[in-house]
Amino acid sequence: MENQITSNTNWYMVLIKGILMILMSLMVFNSPGGALIAYSIYLGIGLMLTGLMILYRGIVLRKDNVHWGWSVFEGMLDLFLGYIIVVNPLVTAAVLPMVIGFWAMFYGILIIIRSFSGTGSMIIKILSGILLIILGNIIMHNPIFAGVTVVIWVGALLMIAGVYNVIISFKLK
């Protein structure tokens, strides 16, 4: 993230991202049941939109791409899966802990790798990354536990990532 920002004039964008993540975490803590259903529906809509774009690209580029049929197939598959998720968000809620746990672990690893870049506080980055990896592991390896409390864990993940971004924004300033 810090590597993408080439000047200190964009520090406020990282601050806004951090504040939004903190606000989202507070909303999640306020309404955990609604947040879980919203995650599922959001994921389904995202898949349907992605499917439409891939389908469109496959059809438009069929003269230039020999394998355009695979793009059309991928787009149709994304549309289908998105539809299934939107129609039955409870199925998605069962799979969501694995997806969120993987995201948290991946983001934590990226933060730790970035801690060696020389910008910002190395200790804060490493601690944030370790916390995200631990929470991601808890979510991924205890699906029953995570299924009951996934929303609370996502709120904690958003809070940690948001605080991290706020701290980094002031370091960039």
Image (cartoon, grey):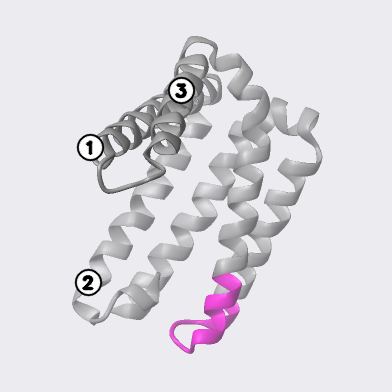
Residue 131 drawn at (x, y percent):
66, 60
Q: Who's the residue at 56% across and 68% down the image?
A: 110
Structural crowding at the residue carrying mark 3, measured as other residues with C-alpha within 10 Å and reported as few (<14), some (14–19) or many (≥20): many
Q: What is the span of residues highlighted in magenta in the rendered image?
A: 111-123
Q: How many marks?
A: 3
Give the labeled residue for mark 2. Answer: 10
Residue 70: horizontal and vertical position, in percent? Answer: 45, 37
The amino acid pointed to by label 2 is: Asn
Cα gap from disc 1 to disc 2, whole angstroms:
37 Å
Q: Residues within 10 Å of mark 2 (few under 14, many from 20)?
A: few
Q: CA distance from mark 3 to mark 2?
A: 35 Å
Indicate the secondary structure of the residue bearing disc 1.
helix
Pointers 3 and 2 in contact (C-beta within 8 Å) = no
Element carrying mark 3: helix
Q: Specify whether 65 is left or right of 22.
A: left
Look at 54% across and 16% down and name the residue there.
89
Residue at the disc numbered 3: 82
Label drawn at residue 60: 1
Q: Residue furthest top?
A: 87
The answer to which of marks 1 and 3 sits earlier in the sequence is 1
Look at label 1 and name its amino acid: Val
Q: Nearer the viewer, residue 102 or 154?
A: 102
Determine the residue positioned at 69% across, 50% down. 135
**Magenta segment, prevailing SS (helix, strand or loop):** helix
Quadrant location of the N terminus in the rendered image: bottom left
In terms of sequence position, does the residue under pointer 1 or pointer 2 come before the other?
Answer: 2
The reply to whether the C-beta atoms of the residues labelled 1 and 2 are less than 8 Å apart is: no
Q: Residues within 10 Å of mark 1 (few under 14, many from 20)?
A: few
Evaluate if marks 1 and 3 touch, with contact meaning CB atoms under 8 Å apart.
no
